[in-house]
Image (cartoon, rainbow, N blue to C red):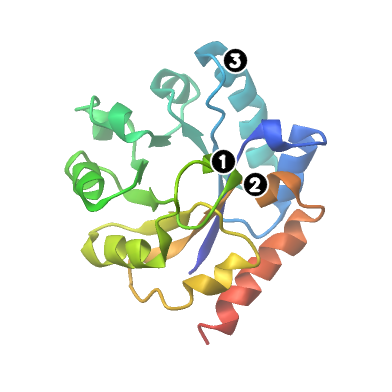
Amino acid sequence: MFEVICVTNRKLCKDDFFKRLSCIAKSKVSKIILREKDLSEQEYSNLAEKVLKIGSEFNKEIILHNYLSVAKNLSQTKIHLPLNVLKNCKDIKNNFDIVGTSVHNLSELKIAENFGADYVFAGHIFKTDCKKALEPRGTEFLQNICDNSNIPVYAIGGINSETISKLKDINSKNFKGVCIMSEFMTCDNSAGFVNKILKEYRVFHK
């Protein structure tokens, strides 16, 4: 199954963050990564409690990001970590069932696998306002990551309802889906947006 994952950034929201997350949680999105990098550990914990309630209300998986102690305190068994954090967690699989991280080259992919990652986000694939100063790595990079990976790979960076079609030639059993931040945080219709992404993907993978 092709997955569409929402990665949060409340600073991009022009409306109420929690109402938007509720709308996203009601859609066909696979899961939501609560990635709010500017918050302190306590601030993140307070936010996570509210977002986890939204996930529970709509039966949608919420995965916390970065703060190991917050995830443990909130009894979460899945977490997404920056690679440098994962590398310093030798006993990570003793505390979490599923661990994800983000990679930007083959070397990082192998480090992620060696340190117990269950999946990776690979990017950034296309131009994105989040990384204006950096050139996108493109679909050839994504294919290379997928070809050399032993775990599921999700594309991230500049993916939206227009660029999704550019992934049509990615041919790998390890390519499991896409992660989207900006358009989820700004679109007028979250459910419609997810449906459009899934529809576009199915069109070229019939």
Front position among marks 1 and 2:
1
- Under mark 2, the amino acid is Ser
* Disc 2/disc 3 C-alpha distance (Å): 22 Å
Where is residue 21 drawn, in percent x and y? 71, 41
Q: Assess disc 3: are there few (<14), some (14-19) or many (≥20) residues with their C-alpha within 10 Å of its C-alpha.
A: few
Q: Nearer the viewer, mark 2 or mark 3?
A: 2
Please state the horizontal and vertical placement of residue 142, each as a whole percent of the image: 36, 62
Residues tagged 1 and 2 counted as in contact (Cβ below 8 A): yes
Mark toward the start of the polypeptide (2 vs 3):
3
Q: Are marks 1 and 3 in contact (CB under 8 Å)?
A: no
- State which tag comes first along the sequence, 1 or 2: 1
- Mark-to-mark CA distance, 1 and 2: 8 Å
In the depicted structure, whether residue 175 falls above or below residue 49: below
Q: Secondary structure at mark 3?
A: helix
Residue on which disc 1 sits: 130
- Expressed as whole percent of the image width and height from the top left, the position of residue 90 reads 19, 27
Would you say 113 lies left or right of 2 here?
left
Asked if residue 88 is positioned above or below residue 203 in the image, the reply reads above
Pointer 2: what residue? 182
Q: Which residue is mark 3?
A: 43
